[in-house]
């Protein structure tokens, strides 16, 4: 399933596995589209409230906490299992992840593992080889990617509480709205949920649309992933995307001290107080002067 870099494919990729849920109906598609664009248009409601500093603080807090929940939990834990934790904290971190309004942890991890398994080839949900907007957000509305891909997340699906959370991922956004309302009323909801969610979405999506386009390549990983300091600062460290594709199960994406990786700094603190352990580090071969990494295994790495 190799595709030339000059010839984008047109086929939609593999069919959902036998355990995948049926795709959404047309009615459900329109409902989720209205919610998706409604939240973004709704963020303009911030202009209907007289500005208060607490609104800005709430927006910043919900933005950074939920962005970290995506990078440190949905991505580095559920998708790549780059550290270990207790079953109770695994569930609580999953609940935190759902507050970012990016569906459930099993859905997110399944789609993301597809990205690594087929990066920039047919079967990659959001390769920018099919265009910037497709990679940024167009793929989200493709019914093909609506169902949780259980065939990709068997290791996670064996926990019934995670399957439950994946089904009822709406509890996260509901919690976030409730907290924002309790802290600062409807103005708090506009700033801390609607605007913050919109910003968090597009910062997350910038990895899909830009991290295979801008920056430099340190490793020849068999796809287009790149390292970008701009994206790394914007996304709490996810911009070291070529490093990440080189060794995806590593909890650190900044392989050198100057490669700022805020997500990892938080994970380091959590490890220091015993909340998480077995935090995976870059392999020695990552620091070789001329790493011989263009192998079949690195071009199509295993998802975990
Ligand atoms: Zn990638
Ligand atoms: Zn990844």
Image: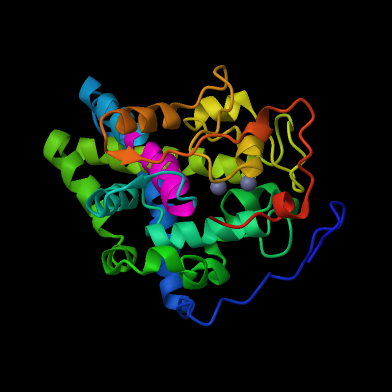
Q: Which residue is drawn at 77% across and 67% down?
A: 10
Q: Is residue 103 left or right of residue 14?
A: left
Q: Which residue is drawn at 60% across and 36% down?
A: 283
Q: Does the magenta stretch include residue 100?
A: no
- Per the rendered image, the range of residues in magenta is 65-79
Q: Nearer the viewer, residue 205 or 300?
A: 300
On the question of residue 76 being in view, the answer is yes
Q: Which of 20 and 187 is in front in this view?
A: 20
Q: Is residue 219 left or right of residue 198?
A: right
Q: Which of 292 and 145 is in front in this view?
A: 292
Q: In which quarter of the image is residue 154?
A: bottom left
On the question of residue 44 being in view, the answer is no
Say which quadrant the N terminus sits in: bottom right
User: Residue 42: horizontal and vertical position, in percent?
Assistant: 36, 46
Against 195, residue 143 (above or below) is below
Q: Magenta: predominant secondary structure element?
A: helix
Q: Does the magenta stretch include residue 77?
A: yes
Against 159, residue 220 (above or below) is above
Against 131, residue 238 (above or below) is above
């Amino acid at each position: 399933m190799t595709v030339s870099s000059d010839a984008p494919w047109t086929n939609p990729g593999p069919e959902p596995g036998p355990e995948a849920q049926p795709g959404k109906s047309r009615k459900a598609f329109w409902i989720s589209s209205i919610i998706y664009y409604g939240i973004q248009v709704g963020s303009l409601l911030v202009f209907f409230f007289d500005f208060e500093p607490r609104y800005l603080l709430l927006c910043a807090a919900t933005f950074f906490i939920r962005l970290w929940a995506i990078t440190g939990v949905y991505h580095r834990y559920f998708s790549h299992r780059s550290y270990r934790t207790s079953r109770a904290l695994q569930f609580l971190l999953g609940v935190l992840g759902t507050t970012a309004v990016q569906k459930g942890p099993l859905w997110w991890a399944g789609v993301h593992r597809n990205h690594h398994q087929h990066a920039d080839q047919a079967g990659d949900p959001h390769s920018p080889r099919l265009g910037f907007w497709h990679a940024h957000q167009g793929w989200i509305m493709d019914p093909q990617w609506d169902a949780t891909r259980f065939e990709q997340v068997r290791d996670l699906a064996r926990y019934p509480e995670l399957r439950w959370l994946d089904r009822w991922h709406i509890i996260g956004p509901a919690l976030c709205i409730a907290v924002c309302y309790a802290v600062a009323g409807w103005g708090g909801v506009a700033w801390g949920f609607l605007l913050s969610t919109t910003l968090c979405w597009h910062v997350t999506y910038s990895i899909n649309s830009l991290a295979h386009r801008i920056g430099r390549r340190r490793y020849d990983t068999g796809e287009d992933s790149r390292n970008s300091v701009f994206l790394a600062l914007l996304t709490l460290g996810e911009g070291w995307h070529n490093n990440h594709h080189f060794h995806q199960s590593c909890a650190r994406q900044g392989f050198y001290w100057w490669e700022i990786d805020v997500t990892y700094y938080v994970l380091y603190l959590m490890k220091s107080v015993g909340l998480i352990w077995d935090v995976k580090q870059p392999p020695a071969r990552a620091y070789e002067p001329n790493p011989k990494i263009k192998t079949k295994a690195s071009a199509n790495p295993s998802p975990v």
